[in-house]
């Protein structure tokens, strides 16, 4: 399998506020731009060969901004990358824009249902982690060249779950830092 370098987009104001972001098109905040610069510099320093990899991002603004800042920090043309809509974040449907306490007040039964089955639960007009895993699994199977990806937290959880053979209870609860880089080269490690 090719080498896969995964960068989660930098922080947004909605991340900082604990809002379910999903596929809403929220831009990076100042901290997110710093994280993207850090990730580009670290990738260049620790894995300079990655400059020759294929670069692909989710089409949402926060991932495009992260990709362009990271590529610029690597001394690469910020615009020389591809977009792939399959790499969009899991959609939380009607829950997007709400914080966990707001969801508990508005949809308490559904929050309890999600806590009982985070993998299979589908928010109203949304998508489950199980559904996302089908989409990301298809993308992973099509991967045929060493690639740097900029995408989202949910996508990284599912991708890591698929690569590491994790179960459906562990996968949706994985931590996905915005200031670290996940690398898969037959084994997993972080930069």
Image: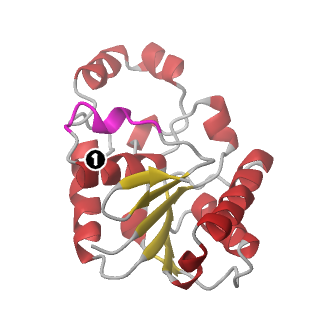
Q: Secondary structure at mark 1?
A: helix
Quadrant showing the N terminus: bottom left
- Residue 135 horizontal/vertical position (percent): 26, 61
- Residue 56 horizontal/vertical position (percent): 49, 75
Q: Which residues are magenta?
A: 167-175
Position of residue 27 relative to residue 124, above or below, is below
99 horizontally vs 30: left or right? left
| Residue 169 covered by magenta stretch | yes
| Residue 141 covered by magenta stretch | no
Nearest the camera: 89 or 124?
A: 89
Nearest the camera: 20 or 44?
A: 44
Residue at 25% x, 21% y: name it. Answer: 113
- Residue 116 horizontal/vertical position (percent): 23, 20
- Residue 173 horizontal/vertical position (percent): 36, 32
Nearest the camera: 6 or 15?
A: 6
- Res 128 seen here: no
Residue at 62% x, 58% y: name it. Answer: 62
Label 1: how many residues lie within 10 Å, few (<14), some (14-19) or many (20+)? Answer: some
- Res 77 seen here: yes
* Residue named by callout 1: 161
- Residue 93 sits in quarter: top left
- Residue 191 sits in quarter: bottom right
Nearest the camera: 84 or 160?
A: 160
């Amino acid at each position: 399998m090719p080498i896969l370098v995964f960068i989660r987009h930098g922080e947004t104001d909605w991340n900082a506020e604990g809002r379910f972001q999903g596929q809403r098109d929220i831009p990076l905040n100042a901290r997110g731009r710093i994280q993207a610069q850090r990730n580009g510099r670290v990738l260049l320093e620790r894995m300079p060969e990655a400059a020759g990899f294929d670069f692909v991002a989710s089409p949402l603004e926060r991932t495009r901004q992260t990709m362009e800042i990271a590529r610029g920090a690597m001394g690469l043309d910020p615009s020389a990358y591809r977009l792939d809509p399959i790499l969009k974040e899991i959609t939380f449907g009607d829950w997007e824009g709400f914080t966990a306490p707001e969801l508990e007040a508005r949809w308490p039964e559904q929050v309890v249902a999600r806590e009982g089955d985070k993998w299979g639960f589908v928010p109203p007009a949304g998508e489950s982690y199980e559904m996302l895993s089908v989409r990301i699994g298809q993308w992973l199977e099509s991967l045929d060249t060493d690639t740097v990806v900029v995408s989202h937290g949910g996508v990284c959880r599912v991708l890591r779950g698929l690569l590491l053979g994790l179960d459906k209870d562990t996968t949706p609860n994985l931590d996905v830092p915005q200031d670290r880089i996940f690398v898969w080269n037959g084994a997993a490690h972080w930069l």
